[in-house]
Amino acid sequence: MKFVICSLVVLLLILHQDNWNWGNDKLVFGFLPFGLFYHACLSVAAAATWYLATVIAWPSTDVDEEAVK
């Protein structure tokens, strides 16, 4: 599963480079610039990726806990 999380992080890094989007003057919902909307969606995707990383790839036990016992 760590491969999936790492792949999602790399995908987010690639999607963050939005040079193709600089000249887009369209408005989303009639008031929100498309670039801002794109980065808001990217932020939600980054939060979801971090959530998946903590739920799936994070170890369930603390290494220091085992050393104390």
Image (tube, rainbow, N blue to C red):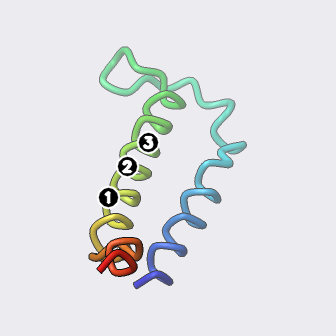
Rendered position, 62 above or below 9: below
Q: CA distance from mark 3 to mark 2?
A: 6 Å
Nearer the observer, disc 1 or disc 3?
A: 1
| Identity of the residue drawn at 33% across and 55% down | 48
Quadrant containing the N terminus is bottom left
Q: Give the quarter of the image for residue 32.
A: top left
Report helix, strand or loop for mark 1: helix
Give the percent coordinates (x, y) of residue 30. Answer: 34, 18
Q: Seen in the image, is 12 located left or right of residue 60?
A: right
Q: Label 3, on which residue?
A: 43
Q: Nearer the viewer, residue 67 or 23?
A: 67
Helix, strand or loop under label 2: helix
Give the Cα separation between the discs numbered 1 and 3: 12 Å
**Quarter of the figure with the C terminus:** bottom left
Amino acid found under the numbered disc labelled 1:
Tyr
30 vs 47, nearest the viewer: 47
Could you tell me which residue is drawn at 36 percent across and 45 percent down?
44
In the rendered structure, find residue 28 and report the number of the disc placed on it.
none
Could you tell me which residue is drawn at 39 percent across and 52 percent down? 45
**Residue 40 falls in which quadrant of the image?**
top left
Q: Residue furthest top?
A: 31
Residue tagged 2: 47
For discs 3 and 2, the disc positioned in front in the rendered view: 2
Q: Are marks 2 and 1 in contact (CB under 8 Å)?
A: yes
- Give the residue furthest to the right: 19
Question: What amino acid is at disc 3?
Answer: Ser
Residue ID for mark 1: 51
